[in-house]
């Protein structure tokens, strides 16, 4: 009798042991740190904020990397980063991917920025309307003389196609009805500045905070981009700078996002962007 | 008689469960897992350090590290010929898709050092490039004293030199007049001894006897490297190509899955085991221990 009871008890124990699932494989992301990826336009502001936050919270590790808006948003959907920096709204492909994975995204505006057309300092042209810019970028206008400049072929440059700045240019200048000319050379922001600075007939466009003295910014619809015209919205090519996060953001990252919302205006000037009022 | 009839099948059931339990306790696979890492030749150095330590602690795993370059590595991981691609750049748009996940694993940086008596505080990236290539060979050209610049460099295998070349030099060769120091310590001594010298070291090799130059007015420290505001900084990633379909299976793995797995298709089983092995190694890389190995070898911890 004893042996049988012991045996049955043993079997019961065995069943209990095997039914308990073994440790599920952890996701490879951990929340001891905050990884931020995305638009290089938003990056300067986030760098200042991250450094100040780390000064005040020495145990926090905040990594910031530029990768373009789309790579940043994909990374938070994948779970390989916690915060995405975006200079344009999430595109439909990524939106769909988030939906498919059951991920809800939170969108936070942290500053404003302007995209400014740039030409070589020797170019006599100082202003263009949005329509003329569109005609140049679709290839309908290919000579500077058509817009009051020299008789020379326009050397067209654009930002790489998945960058937030290109998305902004597409939205604000090219529009949904038109396609950018295949003659436009896609470049990153530094290379574009370099080409425009050294080629007299080149045209490009840049986020406001990346313009330097090597290039000449144009006014658009006779309005020059500056702090006042951007904040008031009178400068036509203005956009919102955003953070995207998942709704299930870990606590430490949530605290940092709150810090960003409350302190972005302090570093806006230094970052060449404009605070939300 | 009745008791005996129940007893025999019960014994068989118990024996089977005992066997499976033992197999479960033995770990994810009772054959050695092999992980192949390929890609960036500068990340290779870090991968080898991480792999060595991981293999010491995990008998059942073998990790083989190769170079080949970031781009070939990405192609290889997608066609399954390697398991992890290491890159020293972020993915391009056409490289990033549904199954591709890139994990930041570390960041390294190069510090530019001069003699403590040098009045220069900051240089631009272009000036650094021109000095190390020899295009600028006098300190007066960058606001210093009228004296020739002596470049101190490292041998071509040095990872710090590779970092300098990749981030700053833009294809330009190092100055022919450069003195080659065989180690970071030796380089620092050369710079400390010569008021006209300039050299480069990683964060961990900065010593008290030299002056670290700011770049574009930005000081090199852990924070500015983490945010990449310090310009001579680079991030590394491990990229995994997570084949669709396996993800759902992998969130929980209990004994019944293992039983099913044991009798299921061998290929799917080993893919699953491989995936688990890869993620276990990745967790190690992201752990404090893994990050310390990276720090000890010139990176900063990103987790």
Image (cartoon, coloured by chain):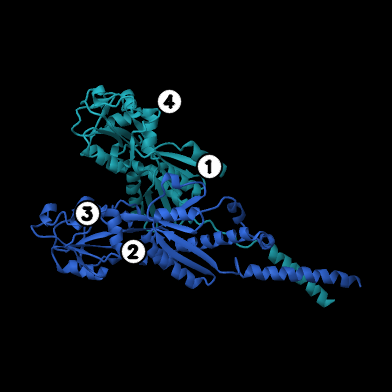
**Chain hosting mark 2:** B
Q: First in sequence: mark 3 or mark 2? A: 3
Q: Is residue A273 above or below residue B33?
A: above
The disc at residue A177 is 4
Q: Secondary structure at mark 2?
A: loop
- Real-space Cα separation, disc 4 to disc 2, in angstroms: 51 Å
Residue that badge 3 annotates: B129
- Real-space Cα separation, disc 3 to disc 2, in angstroms: 21 Å
Asked whether the beta carbons under mark 3 and mark 4 sit within 8 Å of each other, the answer is no
Which callout, 1 or 3, points to the residue nearer the camera?
A: 3
- Real-space Cα separation, disc 2 to disc 1, in angstroms: 37 Å
Neighbor class of circle 3 (other Cα within 10 Å; few <14, some 14-19, many 20+) is many
Neighbor class of circle 1 (other Cα within 10 Å; few <14, some 14-19, many 20+) is some
Q: What residue is rendered at 27% in x and 52% in y?
A: B170
Seen from the viewer's position, the closer of residues A46 and B244 is B244
Neighbor class of circle 4 (other Cα within 10 Å; few <14, some 14-19, many 20+) is few
**Colour for chain B in the figure:** blue
Asked whether the beta carbons under mark 3 and mark 2 sit within 8 Å of each other, the answer is no
Q: Secondary structure at mark 3?
A: helix
**Colour for chain A in the figure:** cyan
Residue that badge 2 annotates: B298
Which quarter of the rendering shows the N terminus of chain A? bottom right
- Real-space Cα separation, disc 4 to disc 1, in angstroms: 26 Å
Residue that badge 1 annotates: A97
Q: In x, y percent, where is residue A268?
A: 31, 41
């Amino acid at each position: 009798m004893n042996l049988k009871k012991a045996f049955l008890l043993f079997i019961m124990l065995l069943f209990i042991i095997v039914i308990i699932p073994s440790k599920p494989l952890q996701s490879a992301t951990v929340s001891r740190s905050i990884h931020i990826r995305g638009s290089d336009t938003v990056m300067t502001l986030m760098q200042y904020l991250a450094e100040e936050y780390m000064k005040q919270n020495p145990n926090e590790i905040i990594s910031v990397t530029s990768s373009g808006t789309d790579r940043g948003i994909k990374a938070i959907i994948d779970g390989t980063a916690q915060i995405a920096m975006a200079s344009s709204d999430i595109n439909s492909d990524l939106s769909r991917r988030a939906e498919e994975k059951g991920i809800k995204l939170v969108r936070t505006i942290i500053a404003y920025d302007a995209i400014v057309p740039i030409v070589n300092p020797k170019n006599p042209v100082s202003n263009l309307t949005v329509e003329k810019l569109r005609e140049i970028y679709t290839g309908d206008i290919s000579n500077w003389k058509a817009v009051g400049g020299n008789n020379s072929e326009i050397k067209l440059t654009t930002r790489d196609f998945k960058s937030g700045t290109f998305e902004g240019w597409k939205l604000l200048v090219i529009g949904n009805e038109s396609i950018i000319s295949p003659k436009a050379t896609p470049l990153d922001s530094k290379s574009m500045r370099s080409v425009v600075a050294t080629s007299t007939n080149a045209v490009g466009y840049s986020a406001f905070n990346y313009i330097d003295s090597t290039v000449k910014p144009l006014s658009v619809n006779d309005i020059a981009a500056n702090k006042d015209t951007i904040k008031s919205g009178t400068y036509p090519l203005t956009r919102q700078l955003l953070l995207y996060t998942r709704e299930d953001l870990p606590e430490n990252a949530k605290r940092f996002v709150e810090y960003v919302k409350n302190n972005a205006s302090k570093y806006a000037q230094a970052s060449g962007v404009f605070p939300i009022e | 008689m009745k008791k005996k009839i129940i007893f025999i099948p019960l014994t068989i059931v118990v024996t089977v469960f005992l066997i499976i339990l033992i197999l479960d306790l033995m770990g994810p696979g009772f054959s050695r897992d092999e992980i192949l890492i390929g890609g960036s030749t500068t990340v290779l150095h870090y991968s080898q350090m991480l792999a060595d330590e991981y293999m010491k602690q995990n008998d059942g795993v073998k990790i083989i590290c190769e170079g080949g370059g970031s781009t070939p590595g990405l192609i290889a991981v997608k066609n399954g010929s390697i398991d992890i691609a290491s890159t020293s750049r972020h993915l391009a748009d056409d490289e990033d898709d549904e199954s591709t996940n890139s994990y930041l694993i570390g960041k390294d940086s190069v510090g530019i050092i001069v003699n403590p008596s040098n009045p220069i505080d900051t240089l631009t990236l272009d000036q650094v490039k021109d000095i190390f290539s020899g295009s600028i060979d006098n300190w007066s050209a960058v606001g210093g004293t009228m004296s020739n610049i002596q470049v101190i460099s490292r041998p071509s295998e040095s990872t710090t030199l590779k970092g300098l070349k990749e981030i700053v030099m833009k294809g330009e060769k190092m100055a022919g007049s450069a003195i080659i120091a065989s180690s970071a310590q030796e380089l620092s001594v050369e710079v400390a001894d010569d008021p006209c010298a300039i050299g480069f070291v990683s964060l961990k090799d900065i010593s008290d006897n030299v002056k670290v130059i700011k770049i574009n007015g930005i000081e090199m420290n852990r924070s500015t490297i983490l945010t990449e505001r310090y310009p001579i900084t680079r991030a590394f990633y491990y990229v995994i190509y997570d084949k669709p379909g396996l993800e759902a299976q992998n969130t929980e793995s209990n004994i019944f899955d293992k039983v099913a797995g044991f009798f299921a298709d061998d290929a799917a089983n080993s893919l699953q085991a491989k995936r688990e092995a890869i993620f276990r190694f990745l967790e190690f890389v992201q752990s404090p221990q893994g990050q310390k190995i990276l720090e000890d070898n010139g990176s900063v911890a990103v987790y």
